[in-house]
Structure formats: structure tokens, C-alpha cells
Amino acid sequence: MSDLAREQNQPVPVLSARDIVKNYGGVRALKGVDFDIYPGTVTTLFGENGAGKSTLMKILSGVERPTDGQLILDGESVTFTSTVDARDRGISIIHQELSLSPNMSVRDNIFMGREIVRAGRVDYAEEARQAAALMAELEEDIDPLTPVGELRVGQQQIVEIARALSVNSRILIMDEPTSALSASEIEVLFKVIHDLTDRGVAIVYISHHLEEALEITDYAVVLRDGAMTAKETRDQIDLPWIVRHMVGDHFDLGSPPEGYTFGETALSVQSLTVPDASATGRAAVDDLSLEVAAGEIVCIYGLMGAGRTELLEALAGGSAIERGRILLDGRDISRDSIAQRIAAGLCLVPEDRQRDGLVQSMTVGRNMSLASISEFVRNLFLSSRDERSIVDDSIRDVHVKTDGPDAMIGSLSGGNQQKVVIGKMMSTHPKVILLDEPSRGIDIGAKAEVFKLLSERAKQGVAVVYSTSEVSECLSIAHRIIVMGRGRIVAEFGPDVSKEQIMAASGESAD
């Protein structure tokens, strides 16, 4: 920043990116990106998966080095040799995909690699005290000694945030920090962000939840195909401005598919009760009944703890039921295993695709063929030709953008990884497909592609049931919207319902 700029009281950036270029072989992931990060403000990066946001964040946090260009920290050109180097200079990052150790406690995850050592020994009591204080700041009642693996996904995200806050960074990068949080947890996080910016901390924020991100944005930067397409201050932007620069002028999340009639009842849930694993004597799903017809798309909405995930996992066979029945095409599958339910025509796309939906050490093709492996077993041997045929058809049918079946699953964007999980389950020829937060961690363009895919399957007679914590997704492709609260259905609406009605039924403020 020039002396003239300072004299004119223009803000001085704490960190600047100048003409940043990043090449991976012959692929140019970043094409000369320029932007500034100012103390006490929130700079939000908008862009689809593959736009270059994650690559840029890796460079800012020391994970990667740029091929060309420079970073300027406090007015001086810098090169980060590692994440530790960047952290020592005051830059921390909260990654989109959780990087916690599930067998370790909350306390140990927060202080892993930078333990508090006194007199040559780790001071576990002080670590527990500080961890408890962080949990209190984030308004989450979590015992610091609880193993992370026992927490739900939203709570694990809180622990990830607490770990970053514990470093006392000057620049905090948040990559999809709310992807697994409830509305109340997001409200607390935003309060923490405001407290941090009031103390002069610079926040770099990435989110596919566009309306949500606008609430805290001071500066907006939009990336597309590795290049910056726009940057502006908050008072000059709105949602259409963001979408236009991200994906173009014409965009639609879709509407309920029309032009066909529903078939017979495909899924019947009768007085289902599922115990709450975290609280003895309490039900996560309480005497719930629901019917879904072939070709119907049903959305389940509710706040964190409403029982959405527990319901879908119980239907898929992932958790035990206490009472009630689950009927698929009239046949009771309540006691069937997960494999038996898949074979019968019911499958689940889980909320956490990294943990429950994909095998990171496998290729795209092998991930897609896992659920339908029995179809190409010939005399105890796998038929590679039949497997390849099924995989090629799945990649084409769900529109996965990949170099081919032999590409590693980790090389795909979040949206394409989600389509691989959906394609894997679709290859089992389901009658009913359940999806828990199908758009979690994917961009607005990929979200539209996923919803279009579900609409296409509904037209073919597949019953679709998906849960979401985004009201806008309720108002997209669903023929019917079910609102849950405390394990029960508290309201049911058609596609002409308003956002305010849905939120009021769930007990959530629409403000």
C-alpha cells in the first residue's frame, strides 16, 4: 500500500495476493489472481467447485506454493514453507473436510501438535480447561474428554473451529465452516466471527451457502475457472450479483417435476421409534409414520437434533429400531441388514461422504461399483468387463466430470464426489433412494446438477427422500415437504409453501 493511500485513510491490507498462478502439470488451477485481506473484516470467496478457491486457500495457508506471483504480508513479500510456518506468522485455516482423529478426545484434537508443556510434561489439566472455555465460547456443551468419534458431524465441526480459534491467529481462513452446523450453531459462529473482527482479526470465508455468507461479508471476491471475475464491497452486491459472476445469468435450482402420476406406495414407515444413542431413555425418532409413493420427491426439513439423520439411517438399516415397521413395496424389511435392504431396492446416500460414502484409497470406478459388486461376480471371480460397463454407464448417467474410471476419487471436486456416491447407489437399481444433506459442501452449480439428477430418477419411478437444513432446497424439487421436530413430524406442506411457514413450523426464526 502506497504512502498516498495511507494519507487518504484507505485501509491497509494485512495480506495481499498478487498475480498468483498455480499449475499442476499442464493444468492451470489459478490464472493470475489478485486480492487483498484487511484487518477486522470478512473477505468472502465465492465460486463453484473447481473455480480455484481451495487451491488459493492452500497457498495462503502454506499447504502449497504458487507457481508464480507473490504473497505480501504486512507490506513485505513472503514465502510460506509449510502450514506451521504460516501459522507462526499468524495464519490458520479450518478445512472443509474434517481433519480430526476420531479415537482421540476433544481436548487432544484441539492441542495436537502444540501441546501445553510445563516442567517437561504435558499439562493435560490446563489443556482441558482451555478446551472447555473454547466450547463455552462456542456455546456447545461438550466434555473436553469426549472422544471425537462419539460426536455428531455438526459437533465435530465445532471442535475443528475451536482448534483454529485456540491459535489466536491474525488471519483465519474458514473453508465451509457451517456445512454441518444447525441454524443455532451458525448463529453462534457468526457471533464469534463478529467478536474476532472487532479484535482486528481478518477472516477469509468460503461458503456455498450464499445468502448465509452475505450476512457477514465485508468484501466479496468471485472466482471462475481459476480467474477472478469480480470483487466488490458488501454494499455493492446482492445474491443475483454473486450468482451471475459465478455461473452466468441463467440459474435455477429446479422445481418439482411434472407430467406424470405417482405410482403405488413404495415406502411405508409405520409408528417408527428409534432410540437416541446419546441419551438413555430418549427417542431420536418418536412414533413416526410416513408414506412415499413411487416417483414422489419428499423433502425432510428440521433443525439439528430434529431426528432427520436418525430417521434416514434407521430406514437404511444403519441403526436399530425400538418399535414400528418399515415396508418396501409392501414387504416388511425392518429386520433386514443394510445389504439386504440395498438388494431389495432401498439405499442411502450418507451425510458424510468422506467417511461413509467413499473409499479415498480407491479409484472413481471402484468406488462406483462397490454397492453393485454382486452383479459382476462370475464363479467367485470379478468380471472386469462387466464392472467397467456398469461404471461407464454410471459415470455417464450421473454426469461425473473425471479423467476416467481409473482416476483417484480424491482428484474430483466435492460436487463430483457427491455424484459418484449417488451413482454408486443408483447402480443398485433402487426403488427408494434416501439422501441425507445431498448438497453438503458442494457449490450452487453442482447442487443444481444433483437436484436435476434426482428429478430425472423420480420421473423414472424412483421414490426420492432427501433431508436438508437449507430452506431454499425445500422449495426446489420437492413435491412434499415434511418438517420434523423432536423426532416427530410437526408439519407437512405442498410445494407452494413459503420459506417463513417452513421455518415457523420448525421453531426457527425467519429473521
Image (tube, grey):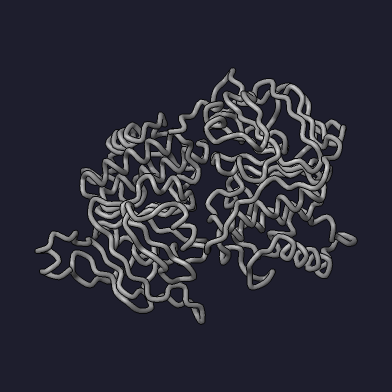
Whether residue 335 appears in this view of the structure is no
Query: Taking 97 as reference, is 35 left or right?
Result: left
Q: Residue at x 29, y 42 (%)?
A: 194
Please, which residue is most extreme toward the top here? 281
Examine the rendered structure and indicate whether residue 334 appears above or below residue 378: above
* Relative image position of residue 507 (x, y in whole percent): 51, 25
Residue 476 image offset from top left, x and y in percent: 62, 45
Foreground residue among 390 and 251? 251
- 2, above or below 122, in the image: below
* The N terminus - image quarter: bottom left
Residue 230 as seen in the image, left or right of residue 299 = left
Q: Quadrant of residue 493?
A: top right
Residue 100 appears in the rendering: yes
Q: Determine whether 139 is above or below 345 in the image.
A: above
Quarter of the figure that contains the C terminus: top left
Q: Residue at x 44, y 45 (%)?
A: 212
Q: Residue at x 74, y 59 (%)?
A: 369
Q: Residue furthest bottom?
A: 26
User: Seen in the image, is 264 located left or right of residue 308?
Assistant: right
- Work out whether residue 286 or residue 467 is closer to the camera in this orientation and state it: 467
Q: How many marks?
A: 0
Residue 67 position, x and y percent, is 38, 78
Point out residue 497 in the picture as x, y percentages from the top left corner.
Answer: 61, 34
